[in-house]
Image (spheres, grey):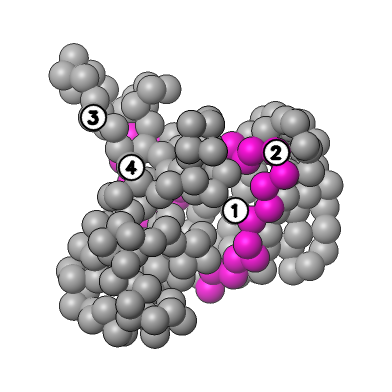
């Protein structure tokens, strides 16, 4: 599986980023573990890159630290000749991204922004996300660029196809599923935080 287009391993920087955020906010491992509803041993393993966080863990960490999900997305080094573009343009091979259990999520903006996330997610066939509830103000807007998506918002199911779009409040409970057994689903989405 690790040789497929979707690698199940989370990049090492996620644990390092989690530790850096925790230390910068002067939060103990025990306090973070309580916030994530996990054991201190598990959080320690996350920070050392020995365990893979779930999306639910990452969303909870985003809430605890007040950062968008894009904070955990890795940035590949840019070429020196692209220095003048760094705050304006993102080239396709130079996007920050996160690989997680059958999903690749890429940051489509040059810099992290605490108010807006502009992302592209690719779900491998059959992928179903965990239910998420992010207790923050704001909304998520999405466009199905390729494939199909089953979307549940507060347990109401919607079937979306290529070219369809959606919007829901970030405070809703939501999850999604790629129902195809052979084709990926590609979604362009924007998270707006108030």
Q: Position of residue 32 (x, y in %)?
A: 33, 78
The residue pinned by badge 2 equals 125
Q: Is residue 150 above or below residue 43?
A: above
Q: Nearer the viewer, residue 125 or 147?
A: 125
Residue 69 can be seen in this image: yes
Q: Which tag, 1 or 4, sits closer to the chain's start?
A: 4
Q: Name the mark nearer the viewer: 1 or 3.
A: 3
The residue pinned by badge 4 equals 74
Magenta residue span: 109-135
Q: Which tag, 1 or 3, sits closer to the chain's start?
A: 3
Quarter holding the N terminus is: top right
The residue pinned by badge 3 equals 77
Mark 2, residues whose alpha carbon is within 10 Å: few (<14), some, or many (≥20)?
Answer: some
Determine the image quadrant of residue 69. Answer: bottom left
Tell me whether circle 2 and circle 4 mark residues in contact (CB < 8 Å).
no
Determine the image quadrant of residue 58. Answer: bottom left
Mark 3, residues whose alpha carbon is within 10 Å: few (<14), some, or many (≥20)?
Answer: few
Describe the element under mark 4 as helix, strand or loop: loop
């Amino acid at each position: 599986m690790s040789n497929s287009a979707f690698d199940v391993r989370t990049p090492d920087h996620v644990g390092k980023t989690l530790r850096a955020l925790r230390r910068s906010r002067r939060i103990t491992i025990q306090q973070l573990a309580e916030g994530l509803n996990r054991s201190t041993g598990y959080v320690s393993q996350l920070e050392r890159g020995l365990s893979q966080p779930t999306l639910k863990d990452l969303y909870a960490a985003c809430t605890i630290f007040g950062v968008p999900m894009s904070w955990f997305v890795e940035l590949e080094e840019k070429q020196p000749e692209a220095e003048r573009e760094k705050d304006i343009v993102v080239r396709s091979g130079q996007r920050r991204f996160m690989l997680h259990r059958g999903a690749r999520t890429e940051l489509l903006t040059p810099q992290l922004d605490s108010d807006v996330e502009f992302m592209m997610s690719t779900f491998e066939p059959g992928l179903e996300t965990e239910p998420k509830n992010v207790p923050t103000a704001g909304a998520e807007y999405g466009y199905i660029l390729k494939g199909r998506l089953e979307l549940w918002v507060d347990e109401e199911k919607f079937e979306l196809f290529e070219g369809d779009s959606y919007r829901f409040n970030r405070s809703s409970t939501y999850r999604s599923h790629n129902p195809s057994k052979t084709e990926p689903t590609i979604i362009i989405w924007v998270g707006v935080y108030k």
